[in-house]
Every structure is written in C-alpha cells, then in structure tokens.
C-alpha cells in the first residue's frame, strides 16, 4: 500500500479530492466513464466538498455507496444524507447516475440482491469499480465489514446486510468487490485511528480492514492518525 501522511484533516481532504478527480479524468479518457464508490461515517464529507469544486465530468460518473445504515430516507445517520449535502447538492451538473443503497426496502436480503444486480449491470461480473473510497473505524471496521459479523465471510455476493452494529443494521459491499477495484483510496484522520491504522499498515488480517487487498491502495492520513507507533 502506498501512503501519504499529510499535515492535517484539511490537507487530507484536499488531497483525497484531487486523487478522485484525477482518477475520474483518467477513467473517462480510457473508458468513457468513472465508477466510484464512496464510504460513509464522518471523515469523507470535507473531501467531497472539495471534490465538488474540482473539474470532473460528472455526466460520466456513476456513483455508488460502499455502505449504508438501514434508516429512513433523509435520516441524519444515513450516509446518503451527508453525501447529498457534501457533494450532490454542490456539483455543477448531476452525475450520470447515483446508485443509492435501497435500504428503505422492507426485505433487506432482497434489497442487497437488487443492489448487487445494479452493480453487475453497470460494473460487470465480477464488478470492477474504478475507485473505491474506504474509511477506517476505531475498531478496525471498514465499509460495514464490521467485527464478528457473518458479513466478513460473504464470498458469494457483492452486497450483504450486517446484524445490528452501533444500533443499526447496515448494507455493505463485500470483500470480493473491493478486491476487484482498480484503486482503493483509504482516507483516515484523527489520533483515535492510529492504533488500527498501524495494524492496517502491518497487514493485520485479524481486523476487518486488514483483509482488504492492499496492492492497489493509496492511504491518505493526517499526522495524528498516521504516526507510526514505536516498536
Ligand atoms: O461507520 C462507518 O465508519 C467508517 C469510518 O468512518 P470515519 O468517519 O471514522 O472515517 C466508514 O468508513 C464507514 O463507511 C462508515 O459507515
């Protein structure tokens, strides 16, 4: 995994936006479209605000979600709510498509199947995203690949639903999809992430994030998260 340790959250957000915009230009030039999956939590939104200001051919971008909390439309805990405010409300033209995880459907298993179908229809089988953005939880989770959940062993499907985690069930992309991505962009900030980030960098497969393929990955971290622990 390549890595860049930057001064602070603002530098990470700006660099993350630049990396995504560059990847978009490259993908659009090479293949006429850019397939992007964005994670949730709290870290991505500053980066996406910067991204909205950069030159990207949005009409060639298909946007997917890496994970989503099962909650009503517009709920503050929904990643889509923040994605909308940070990016979709700000871009000069709408993306070609925004593929929101259908977490309002009553049958979660059916919802996951439908999302997997829509990914396959756009990104192929196995699906290949141009860029998947990932964050890192303080417990080592990434996307909603959360500790001690059967979702970690899902190899047969691109999308799965977790048990309750932090008060909500969640829908998530699974490891096989992440493994086929052309690029993975890790964006990790804050001192609270330092212990897990060190384990991720060490390739510790006992944490969920450590099981994501690392050879096509770029890590952007601020100094607070990215300082190396003493041996
Ligand atoms: O719950 C989640 O947490 C992780 C980490 O979020 P962060 O804001 O601490 O970076 C995130 O990557 C994931 O998508 C999200 O649902």
Image: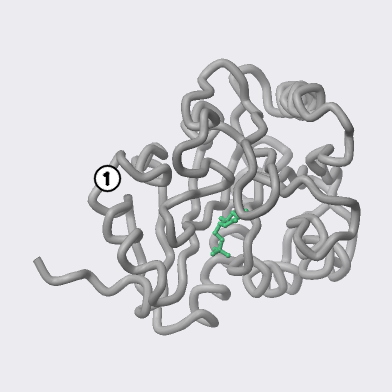
Is 54 on the left-hand or right-hand side of 190? Answer: right
User: Where is ligand 1, by quadrant?
Assistant: bottom right
Q: Nearer the viewer, residue 214 or 207?
A: 207
**Whether residue 181 is situated above or below residue 77 in the rendered picture:** above
Element type at mark 1: loop
Q: Which corner quadrant of the image does residue 221 belong to?
A: bottom left
Above or below 136: residue 105: above
Q: Who's the residue at 57% across and 52% down the image?
A: 133
Q: Position of residue 50 (x, y in %)?
A: 68, 74
Q: Nearer the viewer, residue 9 or 194?
A: 194
Q: Please determine whether, in this image, residue 198 is positioned above or below residue 183.
A: below
Q: Considering the image in quadrants, where does the C terminus appear?
A: bottom left
- Please state the horizontal and vertical placement of residue 28, each as a whole percent of the image: 69, 44
Q: Residue at x 89, y 34 (%)?
A: 105
- At 51% from the left and 35% from the top, the residue drawn is 149
Where, by quadrant of the figure, is residue 119 drawn? top right
Tag 1: Cα neighbours inside 10 Å, few (<14), some, or many (≥20)? some
Find residue 158 and report its horizontal and vertical position in percent.
Answer: 62, 26
Asked whether mark 1 and ligand 1 are closer than 8 Å, the reply comes as no
| Residue 9 visible in image | yes
Residue 28 visible in this rendered orientation of the protein? no
Write down the residue under mark 1.
Answer: 203
């Amino acid at each position: 995994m390549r890595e860049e340790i930057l001064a602070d959250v603002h530098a990470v957000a700006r660099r993350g936006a630049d990396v995504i915009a560059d990847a978009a230009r490259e993908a659009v030039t090479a293949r006429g479209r850019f397939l992007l999956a964005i994670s949730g939590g709290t870290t991505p939104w500053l980066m996406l605000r910067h991204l909205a200001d950069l030159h990207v051919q949005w009409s060639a971008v298909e946007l997917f979600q890496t994970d989503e909390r099962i909650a009503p439309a517009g709920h503050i805990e929904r990643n889509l709510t923040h994605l909308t405010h940070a990016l979709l409300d700000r871009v000069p033209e709408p993306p070609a498509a925004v593929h929101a995880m259908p977490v309002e459907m009553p049958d979660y298993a059916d919802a996951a199947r439908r999302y997997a179908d829509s990914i396959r229809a756009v990104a192929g089988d196995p699906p290949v995203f141009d860029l998947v953005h990932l964050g890192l939880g303080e417990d080592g989770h990434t996307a909603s690949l959360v500790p001690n959940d059967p979702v970690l062993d899902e190899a047969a499907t691109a999308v799965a639903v977790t048990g309750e985690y932090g008060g909500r069930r969640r829908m998530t992309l699974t490891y096989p999809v992440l493994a086929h991505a052309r690029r993975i962009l890790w964006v990790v900030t804050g001192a609270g992430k330092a212990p897990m980030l060190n384990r991720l960098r060490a390739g510790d497969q006992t944490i969920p994030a450590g099981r994501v393929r690392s050879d096509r990955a770029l890590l952007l971290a601020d100094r607070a998260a990215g300082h190396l622990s003493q041996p």
